Amino acid sequence: MSERTVYEYAVVRVVPRVEREEFVNVGVALYCRKQRYADVKIHVDETKIKALYADIDVSMIKEHLDSFRRICIGDKHAGRIASLDQPERFRWLTANRSTLIQCSATHPGMCVSAEQTHDELFNKLIL
């Protein structure tokens, strides 16, 4: 039997018009210290986002989400924040903010495989 370990995740959201507090879930960020896993899976449903704000620049959103992922995985070309260690990157990305890209509260769980759990959460919450 494999050992279960703690992980944390947050749902990544696009908030086209912050003042309206409407959002579309577009991804799941997951961090597992023991397995040294930190990643975010993204899927942008343009139809849903444009339903909230027809004039939104979806290509800009995709660029921001790409930066979000690059920071999460620690891409050395993604700037200073990407050079922080995994917990600091995850905490920075999931901190409360009032911007176009936001995260839900962070939720804990137990898993055997962080990658498999990440796939399961992504399929359940995003797709």
Image (spheres, rainbow, N blue to C red):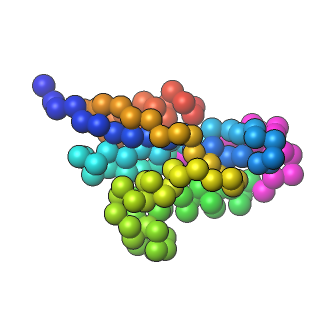
Quadrant where the C terminus sits is top right
Viewer-side residue, 94 vs 56: 94
Q: Is residue 90 found inside the magenta-colored segment of the image?
A: no
Viewer-side residue, 89 vs 95: 95
Indicate whether 75 appears above or below 126: below
Q: Position of residue 16 (x, y in %)?
A: 76, 48
Q: Is residue 94 left or right of residue 44?
A: left
Which residue: 81% across, 52% down? Answer: 56
Which residue: 53% across, 39% down? Answer: 105
Residue farthest toward the left in the current orientation of the protein: 1
Quadrant position of residue 61: bottom right
Residue farthest toward the right in the current orientation of the protein: 55
Camera sees residue 119? no
Q: Is residue 1 left or right of residue 118?
A: left
Q: Position of residue 47 (x, y in %)?
A: 76, 38
Q: Position of residue 86 (x, y in %)?
A: 35, 58
Indicate whether 24 appears above or below 70: above
Q: Is residue 106 left or right of residue 38?
A: right
Which residue: 72% across, 46% down? Answer: 15
Q: Is residue 39 left or right of residue 64?
A: left
Camera sees residue 30? yes
Q: Which residues are magenta?
A: 42-57
Q: Position of residue 1 (x, y in %)?
A: 13, 25
Viewer-side residue, 13 vs 104: 104
Which residue: 76% across, 48% down? Answer: 18
Q: How many marks?
A: 0
Q: Is residue 53 found inside the magenta-colored segment of the image?
A: yes
